[in-house]
Image: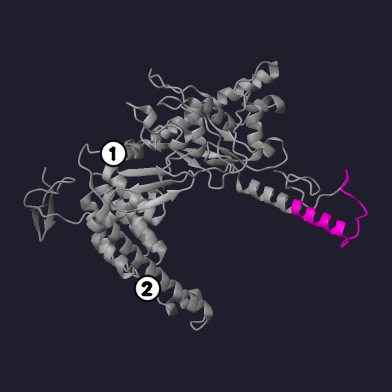
């Protein structure tokens, strides 16, 4: 139905509005977001910053602030130059085409910039977006007006936008006073603009399209991790209510079991039995979520390919050191947690290393496929994909790869199935290696030399031979230095340069090197 309005005393029909993502013939496109005037009260200079901070414009602080402004502008210029340099390396995949060339480009950028392949791929994508879809903002970055942090925020904001929405962001934000407005104003205006475009546009992901479960490790390696569940608000609230209702029901059951002296359900580590009171609701939500059987709709889930590995230094097991253990070769865990895990396991697997250089002692194999023990051995060396810069864990999505190809027709003349000729690669990089896009060569000393086809890039990776953590290495170094000091003291006593001490190292001796794992008068710890 047409919409009318009064104009100059007569009824005038309103022009029809174009549906989202389409045009109505004869009706021109109109801006879908307001073109706000975003300006600063005064330009950002050394004097204006000093005035805002209340400091003397001629002071050393004001001079330092001016240098910071200039440094940030230079950083923006260099970042824009980097984006323009790597943007041509991006290859837009054809429908159904495997991302081989893009992975190859990510590997090249990662090696050159000494970063991970994931970050290199993100940088490639950002460069392509900046050059092709945000040219005005890239020009503002290139001029030094737009801080790198702000530009990265813009890229994250428009990641799921349509090309038309990105063009509107580029046109509007590039008109802002980016060289002078404060960060709070920039973020507020960007959120408002994005909200308008999301409300008026199409192509933005719906809540049901953003369902995800992501593992987040603790940034301080305190032995904890977080499982973040993202989805539509009604579904997440329903899950939270089910967990809450279940926790309250189990808590009541625990309370009744304690009163009757019966077995206590969902009693984590026997805590309720020990304390004589039910677990908290938070503890019970965790117990229900982690101990419930996952319903996969009748689909059989294969058994894990690898067992969980907790590598614990021997002195930590004995309680002589609190050196952290390592979970699956990646995540440090506290010593007390490692000892508790070890105490609960009926079988321990000893790792044998060469006493001189720390190499894992070889496990022989006579077939093409590595034995289970050899795969576990490789997992210790390669907790993540062996390709330089790749951070994909090898726990599940990995394959054992022969560095020198195995000759199925004549195994005696091909690459052997042994630890020295094997490594673990993620599925993507194993395919690139099979296609000849990347070529590893293992040297006599165990160093792997990686060459990227056609680029001339070559990087060498030394073998992972050291199971020692930095804390343990420091303790052993201190023990060795203490032992050498004792030898020098003994030599000085024998030569008469020092008098004999009143007390020798005995049962009541206080070791000045306490915490190293050895007494100063004891032999070296090796």
Label whose residue precedes the other's in the sequence (2 or 1):
2
In this view, 180 is above or below 275: below
Is residue 476 within the magenta segment? no
Q: Which residue is mark 1?
A: 435
| Viewer-closest of 347 and 241 | 347
Residue 418 seen from this side: yes
Is residue 121 visible from the viewing direction of this image? Answer: no
Residue 526, image x, y percentages: 69, 43
**Disc 1, SS:** loop
Mark 2 element type:
loop
In the picture shown, does residue 452 fall above or below 60? above
**Compared to 209, does 409 lie above or below?**
above
Picture residue at 32% right of the left edge, 65% below the top: 141
Segment tinted magenta in the rendering = 483-508
Point out residue 159 in the picture as x, y percentages from the top left corner: 30, 49
CA–CA distance between discs 2 and 1? 59 Å
Decide if residue 41 is on the left or right side of residue 331: left
Residue wearing tag 2: 41
Taking depth in this image into account, of 88 and 473 the one nearest to the observer is 473
Residue at 35% across, 55% down: 191
Left or right: 403 as drawn, with respect to 286:
left
Badge 2 vs badge 1, beta-carbon distance below 8 Å? no
């Amino acid at each position: 139905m047409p919409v009318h309005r009064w104009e100059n005393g007569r009824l005038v029909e309103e022009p029809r509005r174009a549906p989202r993502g389409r045009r109505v013939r004869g009706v021109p496109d109109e801006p879908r977001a307001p073109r706000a005037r975003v300006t600063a009260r005064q330009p950002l200079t050394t004097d204006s910053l000093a005035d805002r901070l209340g400091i003397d414009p001629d002071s050393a602080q004001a001079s330092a602030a001016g240098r910071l402004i200039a440094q940030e502008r230079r950083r923006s210029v260099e970042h824009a130059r980097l984006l323009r340099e790597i943007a041509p390396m991006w290859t837009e995949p054809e429908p159904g085409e495997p991302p081989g060339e893009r992975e190859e480009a990510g590997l090249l950028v990662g090696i050159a910039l000494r970063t991970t392949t994931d970050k290199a791929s993100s940088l490639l994508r950002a460069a392509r977006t900046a050059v092709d879809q945000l040219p005005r903002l890239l020009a503002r970055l290139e001029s030094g007006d737009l801080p790198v942090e702000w530009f990265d925020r813009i890229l994250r904001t428009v990641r799921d936008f349509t090309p038309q929405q990105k063009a509107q962001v580029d046109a509007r934000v590039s008109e802002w006073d980016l060289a002078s407005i404060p960060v709070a104003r920039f973020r507020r205006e960007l959120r408002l603009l994005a909200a308008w475009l999301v409300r008026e546009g199409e192509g933005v992901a719906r809540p049901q399209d953003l369902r995800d479960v992501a593992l987040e490790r603790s940034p301080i390696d305190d032995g904890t991790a977080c499982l973040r569940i993202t989805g539509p608000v009604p579904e997440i609230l329903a899950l939270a209510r089910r967990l809450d209702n279940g926790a309250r029901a189990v808590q009541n059951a625990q309370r009744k079991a304690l009163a009757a002296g019966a077995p206590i359900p969902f009693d984590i580590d026997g805590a309720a039995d020990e304390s004589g009171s039910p677990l908290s609701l938070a503890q019970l939500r965790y117990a229900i979520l982690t101990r419930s059987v996952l319903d996969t709709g009748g689909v059989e889930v294969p058994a894990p390919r690898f067992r969980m590995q907790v590598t614990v230094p021997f002195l930590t097991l004995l309680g002589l050191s609190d050196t952290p253990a390592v979970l699956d070769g990646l995540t440090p865990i506290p010593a007390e947690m490692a000892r508790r895990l070890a105490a609960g396991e009926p079988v321990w697997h000893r790792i044998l290393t060469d006493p001189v250089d720390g190499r894992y002692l070889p496990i022989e194999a006579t077939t093409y496929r590595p034995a289970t023990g050899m795969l576990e051995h490789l997992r210790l060396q390669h907790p993540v994909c062996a390709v330089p810069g790749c951070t994909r864990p090898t726990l599940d999505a990995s394959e054992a790869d022969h560095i020198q190809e195995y000759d199925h027709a004549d195994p005696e003349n091909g690459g052997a199935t042994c630890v020295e000729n094997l490594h673990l690669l993620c599925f993507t990089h194993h395919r690139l290696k099979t296609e000849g896009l990347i070529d590893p060569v293992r040297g006599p000393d165990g160093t792997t030399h990686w060459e990227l086809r056609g680029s001339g890039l070559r990087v060498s990776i030394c073998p992972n031979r050291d199971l020692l953590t930095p804390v343990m290495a420091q303790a052993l170094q201190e023990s060795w230095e203490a032992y050498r000091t004792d030898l020098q003291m003994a030599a000085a006593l024998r030569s008469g340069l020092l008098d004999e001490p009143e007390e020798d190292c005995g049962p009541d001796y206080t070791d000045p090197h306490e915490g190293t794992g050895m007494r100063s008068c004891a032999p070296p710890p090796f």
